[in-house]
Amino acid sequence: MTVMVYAAIVVCGIVFVAAAVARAVWYARSPIHLRWELYPVPHERPDRVAHGGSYFEGSEWWLERRRPNIWGEIAVMVPEVLFLKALREFNPALWWRSFPFHFGLYLTACAGVGLVAMAAVAQLGGRAMAAGPLWDVVAVIVAVTGALGIVGAMLGALALLHRRITDATLRPYTTAGDVFNLLFFVVAFGALGGGYLVRPAGAPGALSIAIGLLSWDGGLHLSPLLAVGLVLTAALLAYIPLTHMSHFIGKYFTYHAVRWDDAPLGHDGKMAAELARYLTYRPTWAARHIKVNGASTWAEIVTTNPTREHKS
Amino acid sequence: MTEPTRFSDLSNRDHRRVIHLEPSELPPLSVRTTVPAPPRAAKAAEPSADGFALDDTQALDLPQPTTPEEEDALVRAFLSGLEKLFTRENNWTFLQPLLLSMEHCAHCQTCSDACHIFESSGREELYRPTFRSEIFRRLYFQHVKGGGLVSAWQHGTVELNWPLVARLAELAYRCNLCRRCAQTCPIGVDNGLLAHELRKLFSQELGIAPKALHAAGSMLQLKSGSSTGMIPAAVIDNVQFIDEEMTEKTGTKVETPWDVEGADILLIHNAGEVLAWPENPGAFGVILNAAGLSWTMSSEIAGYDSVNYGLWYDDAQFARVALLHAQAAKRLGVKKIVVGECGHAHKSLLVIADRLLTGDLRVPRESFLTVLRDIVVSGRLKLDPSRNDFPVTLHDPCNMVRLMGIVEPQREIVRRVCPQFREMTPHGVDNYCCGGGSGFAIMSGHGFQDWRAEISGRKKLQQILDVFADCLDPSVRKYVCAPCSNCKGQIRDMLAYHGQWQQHGIQYGGLVELVVNAMEGVKPGFIEWEWH
């Protein structure tokens, strides 16, 4: 059974990475779109960001050398990613449910990575490396992080589920899938945390399981509830990028490729070449005013005046 | 209490409107206003038995299928358009933002409180920014991404039939595309974009668009040169008349140069100003001449009308008009195009067209706001702010401010020429739309003008009343500065509908008028305190 658990973790991890990458590639390979920015744009000059201004506030703005301020973006991104700043500002009633959920996931992920790293060190470095005060401190940090993460995510998911079921404004927009998704978190993390807490005396701890996974040690004995928790958590990991919950990927693009994409075409030859290629596309829109006088490519369509249509 | 509107209500074959709002049930304004009697909702006619009504107004003249076969054909055309929206060949222009907004909504409703239409309707579910988006999203998962049981379970379903398609088309025109909701979305989902894309689907596939935007809008502009219908000879004639009027009124010689090759500036107005508010292009003439700038207007087709209604509903129409604007500048060999007081023209030409205008069509394009700011700050005009010693507030046109980040130049000007300037709350990039955005200001049939005065403009009206709360007495003349033609039209209609000139002495106008009113070399009293 233990090997089956290891296999589930590995397979689900691969699915997670593959699905996340596929989604990111899907978005990244979408055509360059027409600009659709929304202010404030944080990579503007700090004096402009303060009031949401842009380079269009400068006289003859095209002469101004653009120097996007990456620190401005970071100053917005960090509190947004870590603390869900926009949600706290615009929907505080939801924030206190959503924040522990998301922050709990971050902590859980950190603990998972920490465990695997510790296991790798223990495997590669041997007993001497996996001992001593520093090791103990790291072990405590990972354990506390994991515990807080699982509890936070589970309580957050329960709070979100409660709101989704009881709030009349959310109900019409709530699908069976939405309820399932939150329940999935509650059940998976409940089984994982519960299974760990009630494991029999002498049963392997988190680090032993991580070492067992890396060394593919089938002799490790996992309690049934903990095994279920591990498999469900792995399945959840694989499931997330297949759903709208993959907004951790989408959000990168909605912010960087849409809201903050204020780059003028300027002298960007690569972008210009790509845009020129799009103008050779042959759209199939059927409205009469789109295709007139035999125009078929975008370039032909937009250079044809539909009010000067030849009459046959 | 009535039941909230459901998605399934839009598929209902009952011809009656899905919702009806009594004016008395709308959120109260802070002061009593004079509304026409009988009010809008009472006089709004029920639609004909052939149509499937949405609410108390109507933006579109939809086809009226008389047989199930005709209905099916329209639904199939809708589905065909829906699929095309998600292909790069048909919609490379907005495919990436569209996909992102389709795939990642968490249904948290954070956006709802940001929407002035939703709030001003008394939180009517039909106008919740996610209502239309959610129908669109469910149709996408059902019909574009394959659907099936798992999809239905994960994303939900809606019944697709002609009543739904017809009502969804209307519902696409109950959003100002101001994108205030998108600003608040923690994920970056953009309901304004989704309304925009729905409009495109209907226009580009089914040929369905409001008459004011298409037949009497972009098509008229492509045919005659202006959505006002003014041909080049007419606009030259009208502007010459304005020059004469302005010369007499200001005591300074005003002469608009036409088709000057090699001029520094090609000034393009919203041609509606020439007809509806001639003092605006007149004031531009006074300022540019007094500042000694090298400028011209163009009599090329579309070169004298900056509007580009395609921005709101049709990519092909948008690109056609943008090209004409750039070609007019290229032919004259001007150094730059300067866009006059028109918000959507700013966004069209400076932002959206940016990746369409390549090669020699890439003429630099600038807002009049920075040009005017430089003139005012430079001291080239002798200004006497005491001439503007009345309460003034500034409306932020969404297109220039939230969607372009031009926030401070207009404030630098107003602070210098208006001693009693006060800001609305909120303002700048957090502003509220005037309620006329995305073409609404020029749409009026079937009670639409009343709908925007009562619902889409209600929040802005409340802001105006709030900012002047300390001086509402009608003997105190107050000025709402709206440096955008469409916003100005909406504010005019809204103030008139609610009787705010008579009741509280609230007047409206542009920005250049305030500058000319403060110019020492100009006869006093450029701004006329008469309702217009």
Image: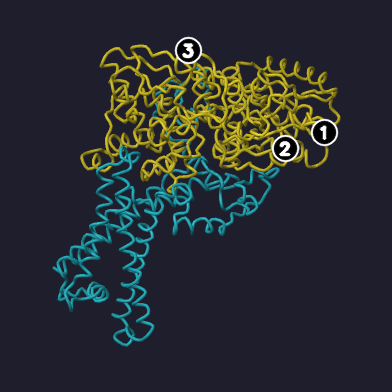
Front position in the image: B26 or B110: B26
Residue pointed to by mark 3: A311
| Labelled pair 2, 1 in contact (Cβ < 8 Å) | no
Residue pointed to by mark 1: B292
Question: Percent from the top left, x then y, of residue A215?
Answer: 23, 75
Residue pointed to by mark 2: B414
| B246 shown above or below A134 | above
Task: Tell which chain the image draws in yellow.
Answer: B
- Mark pair 2, 1: CA separation: 21 Å
Query: Which chain is mark 2 on?
Result: B
Residue plotted at (69% across, 15% down) = B233
Task: Name the residue type under label 3.
Answer: Lys
Q: Secondary structure at mark 3?
A: loop
Q: Secondary structure at mark 2?
A: helix
Q: Is residue B197 left or right of residue B273?
A: left
Task: Name the residue type under label 1.
Answer: Gly
**Residue count near mark 3 (Cα–Cα under 10 Å), binned few <14, some 14–19, many ≥20:** few
| B233 shown above or below B29 | above
Q: In which quadrant of the rendered image does the C terminus of chain A lie?
A: top left
Residue plotted at (26% across, 61% down) = A189
- Mark pair 3, 1: CA separation: 49 Å
Task: Tell which chain the image draws in cyan.
Answer: A
Front position in the image: B429 or A123: B429
